[in-house]
Amino acid sequence: MDTANTPVTPQTRVQSRLLRVFLLQLAIISVLTVAGVLAASWVAERILVNQALQGEADFFWQQRDQDPDYPLPGTLNLTGYMEDHRAQNGATDLKAELVGLDLGQQRVELDGRNVIAHVSEHEGQRLVLLFQEETVSNLGFYFGVVPLSLVLLLMYCLAYFAYVMSKRAVSPIARLADTIEKIDFNSTDTQALNLANLNEPQNSETVVLAEALQHFMARTRVSVDRERNFVRYASHELRTPLAVIQGSVSSLELAKLNGPAERALARIDRAARHMNDLISTLLMLARDKTNQESTDITPVNDTVDELVNELAQVMPNELATVRVDHEAVLDVQAADAAVRIVLGNLLRNACLHGGNSGVTVSVEANAVTVQDRGPGLSEEDQRRIFEPFYRTESSAAGGHGLGLSLVLKTCDNLGWDLSVKSELGVGSSFTVDFGQTVASTSNRVQ
């Protein structure tokens, strides 16, 4: 079966995480168990065996003080050898491998076997006790490996039981998340949650959560339907007077007006067409559609010049010091109305808050910067300036606090990057980076 295109659902993601946690738990338990076995072997050899051999040596020297002929230890696991430095002829029964060993416990290879040697001295005599390595291994196995292996097996079983119970506990929630993820909230007919696949008691937490989500979706569906109806009716009611205005403009154009009347008619016609495009763009934003499918190419340089000229007719005082720097020719693959929404609001805000001190619009290779030398924005204002209906102290002169919110919404939907830099007493600078929507046909050298 081809799993390359198999969709990853919330249920499989949750189960995959549980399995990873289970395997990680087993790995940690295994590492701790191995460390425990090694520690047990070390304790058995370094502490238990050492204490036992030290006790045997002390006991031997006590008995030898009382009885010079007390025999050396000689059992199945323990063998003793003596070296008497007081003897004139250097008498010793030590093998060559045992001569010259340091005092204390150490490992020695004797007759091809690895043994543990304990060396002690008393009144010029040296006692070497040999303990069989096999005995230490047996002690480590029976008192270390076996108990820890049983504990490891028990912990494996408990971990697997916890994994099964956790998987069973989260499976209904994962299936519920999978069901929610498959719901198309943009559909005009949003279906209710299907609880048939939960297989949970009616009073379980999962069913209670699912029912709460159903109620929430029902309220959301009512709100969405109300918003859709408002957008539909607003679109119809706005387009109707625009159609009347455009029809009247067409009739007046037949009269062949001259002078100021002709220029006023041209402005009305241009404003009506822009308003019609603006309504289409706002409807697109209301439906959360992006500009990915747009094939329109908007010349940003021309649009900026037109916006400045249009605002000069309605805001002549504020526009007196606007300067446009065309540093490059910029074409953007987007609707002209969307570009106008963004740049028009930025330019209008700059004129309202810093027009008397000068406004500069810079058209660069892939971005447009609108800079004013007004009072600037505080840190709190910079954090909240894009919130709907938020107005700074310097914005009391005009505006409703929706322009920048609409600018941010448009940039987010179209994939543009909007940034702001401001300093109190110096001014503010808003930059729109058009990113991937910059048309490749643009000529970068003007």
Image (tube, grey):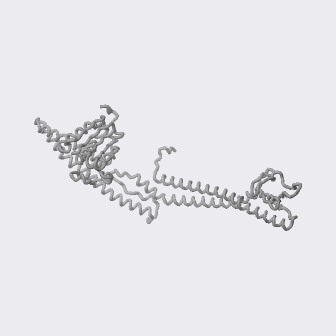
Query: Residue, x 48% and y 57% (percent of image)?
Result: 171
Q: Nearer the viewer, residue 113 or 442?
A: 113
Q: Is residue 61 visible?
A: yes
Location of residue 258 (image quadrant): top left
Residue 89 at x, y percent in the picture: 89, 54
Image quadrant of residue 245? top left
Residue 123, horizontal then vertical, whole percent: 82, 61
Where does residue 84 sit, x and y in percent of width and height?
85, 58
Quadrant placement of the C terminus: top left
Q: Image height check: is 332 above or below 83?
A: above
The extreme bottom residue here reads 66
> Would residue 348 be visible to someone looking at this image?
no
- The residue under the point 34% across, 43% down is 416
Badge count: 0
In front here: 65 or 382? 65
Q: Would you say 320 lies left or right of 150 here?
A: left
* Left or right: 398, with 46 as reference point: left
Q: Position of residue 413 (x, y in %)?
A: 33, 46
Q: Quadrant of residue 263?
A: top left
In-image side of 106 versus 181 (left or right): right
Q: Is residue 84 left or right of residue 272?
A: right
Q: Residue furthest right?
A: 89
Compared with 9, 335 (above or below) is: above
